[in-house]
Image (tube, grey):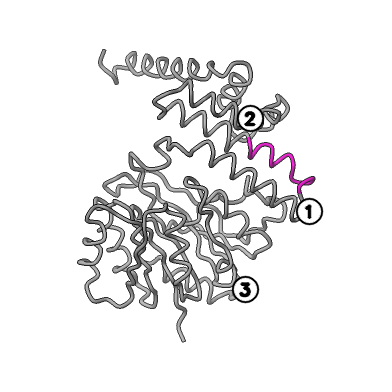
Amino acid sequence: MSILISVIVPVYNVEKYIEKCMQSLLNQTYYNFEALIVDDGSRDKSIEIAKSLVGNDSRFVFLEKENGGQGTARNLGLDHANGDYISFLDSDDFYEPNMLEIVVNEVKDDESIDVLVFGINKVDEQGSLLKKMMGANSIVSTSDDVLLMNTLNRFSWNKVYSRETIIGFRFSTDIKTYEDVDLVYRILYGRKIKSINNCLYNYTQRSGSTVRSFPPSFIKDKVSILANAESFLVEKSIFKENEKDYNVFYLEEVFYKSLIHINKYSKNYKSDVHELSCRANRSLLSFENIRRFKSRQGVRAAILLSSFKVNEQLPYLIVRTNKHIKKSKKILKGKVSL
């Protein structure tokens, strides 16, 4: 009997993108899949468009719920998934036509694989390629990289999971942004993971998405994610040997990413940066930890954290000074008009 794959697709107000997403499933060269289309209280024509595209295709199952965020929509999909393997597809993204076929062939070759990881195409809103992100063909161990600092990313959607691996997990209902970061390292811990260098997932870079906005719960969510990570490491009795990685993880996710998003997208820098200062564990913002962080994110990122440590208003000045410098360079090169 052929392998059944469940594809979970949360949908919320993506009428501009849903056709490409649905069509990528209809175009799959591997037939035996179920697509669980979860309507997360969408208020536009996304679901109507999706239903008209798939018609009477029984492989597509539509589920409805009140709006609660992408994590809760994925959870409902997991509750109804029947597949031997399970994957996630965001409704503003799309698969390559042979994605499922390649996955099935890989797991048939080695049935002991718990998680298959594949490369990503970053594409613009028209679907044109911007950048390829891929790793080498290899068996990946997370035993020395529990928090996925080096070997793998924390996206949930460029991976396919065996049913036994993922079915006991659920995304947090309290964390509204970056819920992948809170969960993926837990799913992968102690599992056999294979990475392939095929770019099978097309990741749309669009304005208004979580990665290009600053939602109200952003800082609270980041702090919660790191509190959960600490609890996980303590529960597994592996905190001490992973403490340095945890500290860098904290600086990256809580301080650095919050500062970047605040500077780019916040409408009230002073109050948001003050919230960060109050909620975050500033004791971890030591120069020793910043030095470790620099080896991962580079000098500019380390300067940003160091400036925040000295004065929480300084990052604002640094970011804007860099913007002016970049613009001046473009003007001098004749790329931007005065």
Q: Distance between the residues labelled 3 and 2?
A: 37 Å
Q: Which quarter of the figure has residue 252?
A: top right
**Residue in view at x 68 percent, y 50 percent:** 145
**Image coordinates for residue 156, horizontal then vertical, percent:** 50, 56
When the figure is inspected, residue 8 is found, relative to residue 226, above or below; the finding is below
Which badge, 2 or 1, comes first in the chain's sequence?
Answer: 1
**Image coordinates for residue 136, horizontal then vertical, percent:** 56, 55
**Residue in view at x 26 percent, y 52 percent:** 43
When the figure is inspected, residue 257 is found, relative to residue 132, above or below; the finding is above
Marks 2, 1: nearer the viewer? 1
Q: Which quarter of the figure has residue 199?
A: bottom left
Q: Which residues are drawn in magenta?
A: 239-250
Residue that numbered label 1 is attached to:
237
Residue that numbered label 2 is attached to:
294
The amino acid at mark 1 is: Ser
Q: Which of 154 and 72 is in front in this view?
A: 72
The amino acid at mark 2 is: Lys
Which badge, 3 or 2, comes first in the chain's sequence?
Answer: 3
Q: What element carries label 1?
A: loop
Which badge, 1 or 3, comes first in the chain's sequence?
Answer: 3
Callout 2: 10 Å neighbours few (<14), some, many (20+)?
Answer: some
Q: Is mark 3 on a helix, strand or loop?
A: loop
Residue that numbered label 3 is attached to:
112
Q: What element carries label 2?
A: helix
